Image (cartoon, helix red, strand yellow):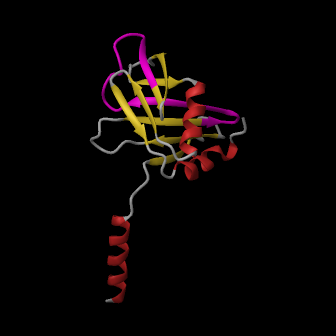
Amino acid sequence: MKYFQTILISMILSACTASSPWLLDSLASTAPDSKRLIYRPEAGSGGARIEFFTSGNQISSYFSSSGRSLGTRATVPARLSLGSESLEEDLPLHEGKMRVRLPESWTLKTIEWLKKGEEVAIKVGSIEQTIQPERFSEHFKQLAKDYHP
């Protein structure tokens, strides 16, 4: 009976624990030192995934739509909002028009702000995703373990 109580309590506690929107993934099949950190929006939010990739001393980030085209032309207007600061730029769409690579300066500013515990908003076309900083630093440490700019 005590065994079943322990299992039940464990199940209840795990159900009450908030899961992180961050997922760290190894890309060893692509390159031995490649990793990515993915920010996944809540299910049904209509948001986009934000992905940070590292390979050696390189880091890049991408904004990916989950099911909708980001635009119909070769480029799409994009905006990065960091508190009262806002940066805007037209970004080239990848094939399929559901993904863009974010400029390096945006990647570095986003990382800096998230590490400071500040939220970041990125809008590409009509799709906007606000990135919450909770648990970013601990996941980014794992991603950046082999990243040496």
> Which image quarter is the N terminus in?
bottom left
For residue 124, which quarter of the picture?
top left
Farthest bottom residue?
A: 1
Q: Looking at the image, which residue is at 72% across and 39% down?
A: 148
Q: Nearer the viewer, residue 9 or 82?
A: 82
* Residue 43 on image: x %, y %: 30, 44
- Which residues are drawn in magenta? 54-79
Q: Looking at the image, which residue is at 40% across and 37% down?
A: 130
The tally of labels here is 0
Farthest top residue?
A: 73
* Residue 93 on image: x %, y %: 44, 17
Q: Nearer the viewer, residue 116 or 59?
A: 116
* Residue 121 on image: x %, y %: 43, 34
Q: Nearer the viewer, residue 98 or 41?
A: 41
Q: Looking at the image, which residue is at 55% across and 28% down?
A: 106
* Residue 109 on image: x %, y %: 58, 33
Q: Looking at the image, which residue is at 69% across and 44% down?
A: 146
Q: Is residue 51 left or right of residue 19?
A: right
Farthest left residue?
A: 44
Q: Is residue 77 magenta?
A: yes
Farthest right residue?
A: 148
> Up-down: is 130 above or below 136?
above
> Which image quarter is the C terminus in?
top right
Q: Is residue 73 left or right of residue 31?
A: left
Q: Is residue 136 magenta?
A: no
